[in-house]
Image (cartoon, rainbow, N blue to C red):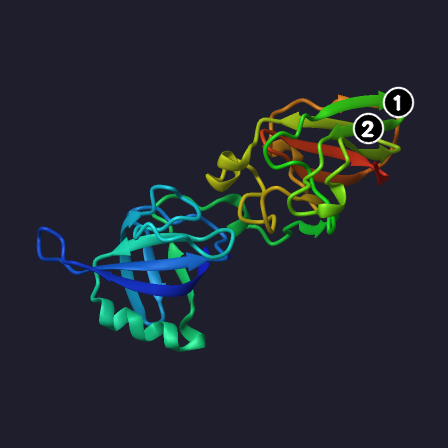
Amino acid sequence: MHEPKGRLIDVYGLPNDGFGQPQTVLMLDQLTHLPETGDVLQVADRHVSVAKVDGQRMRDCLTSWPMSGLGGISVLVNAPTDELLALVSYPNFLWVTWAPKNSSPWHFAADDLPTFTRLNEDWNAHPKDVGLRLEESGNELIARMKPNPYAYRQFENVHEIAVSFLNCSRYRVTSVNDEGWYLGHCRFSGLAPNWGEFYEVSGNTRDNMNSTSWIKMKGVGAKHFHFYLKDETLEIKAQDWVLRF
């Protein structure tokens, strides 16, 4: 059984609450699962119950300061700040695990987890206006979209990029967006390294955990490609892929 975990990166004290209880904010990143109110965190040899979880779920903490790292969140616990503050000085104590009060996602009980290889090392789709358009050509699926010129300056004057999936056997576009991914609505939430990237997924991809119907094509490719876009997720079974612009 795998335990949900996150890295403790900082600790902040807040004034006692109206009942005189101490309040401490734990800032966590590199999460494999989102904690919820009532979950019990294990911080080194301490067990503390989560009193409140950052309402934004991502990026901003309870102190309204920006979080560092994708996957960052903050939680409030009713425990003395001084006791917890000392823990961030010891590398062996930086990892926090917890026992969810509700059932954990499937991947915490599975041994045959899929692996993810990021394919878009020097390019990506536009983060705000992807404009995804799909075109079938024989056994080739062509996904057209706007590139991201902010992170990749070589695309500043490129209006459109096309990702061609060769020998494509089937594909589908699911409704999983960034909010759904962070809330655990994607079967790969907490498994895929980051939202908004293009991956090849190897191993058991658990396709039946999403009810969206597949669109069949004439190819026989079986590799699983997974592209997290602005408002949807593109899943493809194909032999290979090529970027054209």
Q: Do the residues labelled 2 and 1 touch (CB within 8 Å)?
A: yes
Which residue was labeled with disc 1? 137
Query: Amino acid type of disc 1?
Result: Ser
Residue at the (88%, 24%) spot, across then down: 218
Residue at the (16%, 58%) spot, across then down: 15
Residue at the (52%, 44%) spot, across then down: 106
Q: Which of marks 2 and 1 is nearer the N terminus?
A: 1
Query: Amino acid type of disc 2?
Result: Ile
Any mark on residue 234, and which? none
Which residue was labeled with disc 2? 142
Element type at marker 1?
strand
- Viewport quadrant of the C terminus: top right
Query: Would residue 138 be found to the left or right of residue 160 on screen?
Result: right
Is 212 in front, or is 6? 6
Neighbours of disc 1 within 10 Å: few (<14), some (14-19), many (20+): few
Q: Is residue 3 visible?
A: no
Residue at the (33%, 60%) spot, across then down: 26
Residue 119, x across and y down, in percent? 75, 48
Q: Can residue 128 be seen in this view?
A: yes
Up the image or down, 164 lies above or below 80; here it is above
In this view, which residue lies farthest toward the left? 19
Residue 238, x across and y down, in percent? 82, 36
> Toward which corner of the image does residue 149 lie, by quadrant?
top right
3D distance between C-alphas at marks 2 and 1 = 8 Å
Residue 60, x across and y down, in percent? 39, 48
> Toward which corner of the image does residue 103 lie, by quadrant?
top left
Up the image or down, 21 lies above or below 187; here it is below
Is 180 in front, or is 69? 69
Element type at marker 2?
strand
